[in-house]
Amino acid sequence: MNHTITVIRGDGIGPEIMAATLYVLDKMNLGLRYEEADAGLVALEKNGELLPQVTLDSIAKNKVALKSPLTTPVGEGFSSINVQLRRHFDLYANVRPAKSFPNTKSRFPSGVDLITVRENTEGAYSAEGQELSADGEVATSITKTTRKGSERIVRYAFELARKTGRKKVTVVHKANILKSTSGLFLKTAREVAMQYPDIECNEMIVDNTCMQLVMKPEQFDIIVTTNLFGDIISDLCAGLVGGLGLAPGANIGTDAAIFEAVHGSAPDIAGKGIANPCALLLGAGQMLDHLGMPHEALRLRNAIVATLEARDRLTPDLGGDGNTMSFAEAIASRL
Ligand code: NAI
Ligand code: MG
């Protein structure tokens, strides 16, 4: 199959990890075609805008993008490009797997294999009603949860469980306190769960979930939750399995999907050639699953695991003395 994907090389370490990722993908001979598009600081310098229309058009046409981290300039008038992209394409599901890998500095070198499915468009991040009183003493904002938004994210989680052979979905909430918003999410989740009798479903309050994740992460399979809780829980899960260099994420909507690393543009190590390319490579693995190439996705993940097991040419964040490209070459040699 010949797929064309939009490739955004991004800022900071972005171009380095993208070069490494495309090197490995090319070695897999998947027949992928790349359409390059700019976003972030690079785009601002070239075209005077952070998110050019041609980039949006490219993603709309190809429906799939592989994206490196983007730097949002600090200051007035710039809203996060990542949030803009999620809104523009209504990428309502943020899917973040966390799996134990060998030879990382993780507290759980085995036993963690879970996916956080985070609602990506509403909740505390709906950006409505952000107000500060004239005297600067009182700040307010609106948290909005809809039945439609809750229904589609919970359904996504159950469908993902069926598709990937996972057995359990844990609905994470705070309905005991946030009675209207988290309450509507939980009520809707219960209704959706009834339609999936083949998948076990349990409910857990978010603070307890954090404790349980650190004590007994093996009890979780798929977690589905609202935007803010999902943001925090997925970083906690990335920490369980060895940190940002190994954490990928997919932003999925009905008409488009964007695959990325969870981490940012890492300005402290940009240009040094030592960034770990694994997070973006694992994001590319999610992309291959999405494109209907699960065997190729597994082939890629297996090569990454084998390289970690052999401690072959790893980057310094994993305790190795290799660099971004040597790590990619080591992975490519095990495909
Ligand atoms: P960051 O994730 O870029 O860096 C945090 C720490 O992790 C740094 O010490 C960095 O060196 C390290 N790190 C990150 N990725 C690494 C990798 N692949 N290999 C080795 N070490 C790695 O977070 P920070 O510094 O808060 O943000 C920097 C910029 O990135 C900001 O402008 C922010 O807006 C942007 N950002 C973009 C995201 C995206 O495009 N999806 C997500 C998060 C932040
Ligand atoms: Mg986050």
Image: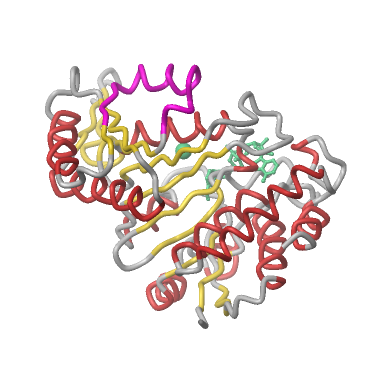
Residue found farthest to the right: 321
**How far across and how far down the image is residue 5, in percent?**
51, 73
**How far across and how far down the image is residue 262, in percent?**
53, 45
Residue found farthest to the bottom: 2
Q: Is residue 142 above or below residue 2?
A: above
**How far across and how far down the image is residue 140, in percent?**
23, 27
Main secondary-structure element of the magenta-colored stretch = helix
Residue found farthest to the front: 198
Q: Quadrant of ligand 1?
A: top right
Q: Is residue 184 above or below residue 156?
A: above
Residue 58 vs residue 270: left or right?
A: left
Residue 132 vs residue 282: left or right?
A: left
- 170 part of magenta stretch: no
**How far across and how far down the image is residue 219, in percent?**
42, 27
- Residue in the picture at 28% in, 33% down: 171
- Residue in the picture at 63% in, 23% down: 107
Q: Is residue 37 above or below residue 312?
A: below
Which part of the image, by quadrant, shows the C terminus? bottom right
Residue 244 vs residue 214: left or right?
A: right
First to last magenta residue range: 202-220
